[in-house]
Amino acid sequence: MFRSNVAPPPRQRASAGRIAGGWLLGLTIVAGLVGAVILGMPALSTPSSAPAPPSQASQGR
């Protein structure tokens, strides 16, 4: 196998703006998921009050 003795150039460090942008994007995604869970909680919970009376449609009227 042939090997080259030429080293690749060193990787450039990410700028502060790119790092901040990545954090901001991640924070936005996490906040969106948390907000969706919080807003969806009432739909996922079962009512703890007494059951509602049957509707007229279920009684055949």
Image (spheres, rainbow, N blue to C red):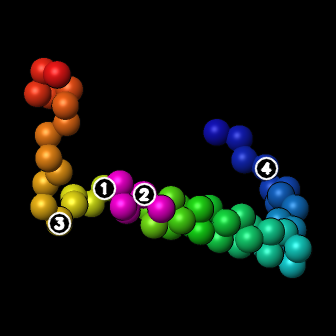
The label shown at residue 44 is 1
| Position of residue 57 in the picture relative to residue 7 (left or right) | left
Is residue 5 placed above or below 20 in the rendered structure? Answer: above
Direction top: furthest residue: 60
Q: Earlier in the sequence, mark 4 or mark 2?
A: 4
Identify which residue is drawn at 42% across, 57% down. 40
Query: Element under label 3?
Result: loop
From the viewer's perspective, is 50 left or right of 38?
A: left
Distance between the alpha carbons at the discs numbered 1 and 2: 6 Å
Amino acid type of the residue tagged 1 in the rendering: Leu
Near mark 4 (Cα within 10 A), the count class, few <14, some 14-19 or many ≥20, is few
Q: Nearer the viewer, mark 4 or mark 2?
A: 2
Magenta span: 39-43
Frontmost of labels 4 and 3 is 3
User: How far apart in space, not on screen, are marks 4 and 2 (Cα)?
Assistant: 58 Å
Question: Label 4 belongs to which residue?
Answer: 4
Q: Quadrant of residue 54?
A: top left
Q: Which mark is residue 40?
A: 2
